[in-house]
Amino acid sequence: MNAQIAVLPGDGVGPEVVGQARRVLEAVAAKFGHHFEMEEAHIGGGAIDATGESLPAKTLALCRRADAILLGAVGGPQWDAPGTTVRPEQGLLALRQELELFANLRPVRVHPRLKDASPLKAALLEGIDVLVVRELTGGIYFGEKRRDGDRAIDTCVYTVGEVERIVRIACEQARKRAGRVTSVDKANVLETSRLWRATAERVGREEFPDVVMEHLLVDAAAMHLLRRPSDFDVIVTENMFGDILTDEASMLSGSLGMLPSASLGAGPLGLYEPIHGSAPDIAGTGRANPYGAILSVAMLLHHSFDLFQESATVQAAVATAIDAGYLTPDIACDGIETFSTAEIGDAVVANLGSATD
Ligand code: IPM
Ligand code: MN
């Protein structure tokens, strides 16, 4: 197939991990006879420096024209000064909102070789396969916010329609998996959560009677994710709870650097990015873990291009590289040899093999 991919490397380690993800895309294209046209653009801090805006109109236009978007990370201390009005993160939030990418899929799996990298006991890590479906364009992230003298106000808003569509995505995903959905809210305190729970319960009952749905309060969910992680199948939750719970869940897999994500809307266009941030402390050192970005490429091939075999091939190449001990410092135990971001990319690309294999 021929496809256009907008590549937004962003800040910090973003360009390093996206560089390896790009190489993987190129190798997949060569092996399977596809043509991926990749064009880069600024977003985040780099975009602020270049244009004064965190999401320049040119970047947004490129993304709208593209069939898929690959992104690294945004943010960094140089754009954090008190009183700063334009922040790098606003560019990413605006992109998600402008393209109506309301469904953020964050799969959590544990590679057997990485059990020692997780702070949890190995016995608890057996059989973990969780998909977190995070609502991405509503909630407290996008409600009205303002300063009023010595008060600051953030508003959390959800509509029935916003909850219905994300719960449907979660239930549809569950049907392809173990058929269970855990809806996470704070219905004992928040009105938005009471609307969330009632809506999730109704959509589940009326439209997905074959899917088993349970409801958990977010504080209890945070605890159960550590106490009995292998019990979960699909977790669906609002924007901020999903942000927090997926950083927590990433430690089951060994590192924040391992998790990919897909942000989807009503059509095939999707935004693919690792869930980690820009990690400015290690930027430029070659220590960044590119597996989250490379696994995001596997999600891109699957969700935006329907290239299921290609996607599975990338996942297998990653698993083989990890098996063979290609580990960055965040997933290697003390005394184990570690490899650079680019060496990990080399290993994955080598495992993909060529068209003649
Ligand atoms: C994420 C990030 C973003 C978020 C930031 C960079 C705005 O933490 O994708 O999880 O909070 O959504
Ligand atoms: Mn986050």
Image (spheres, rainbow, N blue to C red):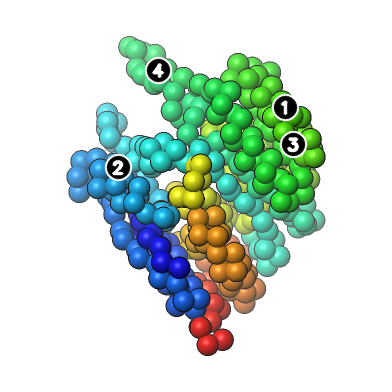
Give amino acid for label 2: Leu
Q: Are marks 3 and 1 in contact (CB under 8 Å)?
A: no
Residue drawn 46% across the image and 19% down it: 155
Position of residue 194 measured from the top left corner of the image (x, y, whole percent): 65, 19
Residue 201: numbered disc = 1
Q: Which residue is mark 4?
A: 152
Mark 4 crowd level (few <14, some 14–19, many ≥20, 10 Å Cα):
few
Using the rendered view, name the quadrant where residue 158 is placed. Answer: top right
Position of residue 61 measured from the top left corner of the image (x, y, whole percent): 29, 47
As measured in the structure, the alpha-carbon distance from the residue carrying label 1 to the one carrying label 2 is 37 Å
Residue drawn 72% across the image and 33% down it: 207
As measured in the structure, the alpha-carbon distance from the residue carrying label 4 to the one carrying label 3 is 41 Å
Q: Which residue is mark 2?
A: 55
As measured in the structure, the alpha-carbon distance from the residue carrying label 3 to the one carrying label 1 is 10 Å
Which label's residue is closer to the chain start, 1 or 2? Answer: 2
Give amino acid for label 3: Phe
Residue drawn 76% across the image and 33% down it: 214
Which label's residue is closer to the chain start, 4 or 1? Answer: 4
Which label's residue is closer to the chain start, 2 or 3? Answer: 2
Mark 4 vs mark 3: in front = 3
As measured in the structure, the alpha-carbon distance from the residue carrying label 4 to the one carrying label 2 is 25 Å
Is 185 placed above or below 134 here? above
Q: Which residue is mark 3?
A: 208
Position of residue 279 measured from the top left corner of the image (x, y, whole percent): 42, 52
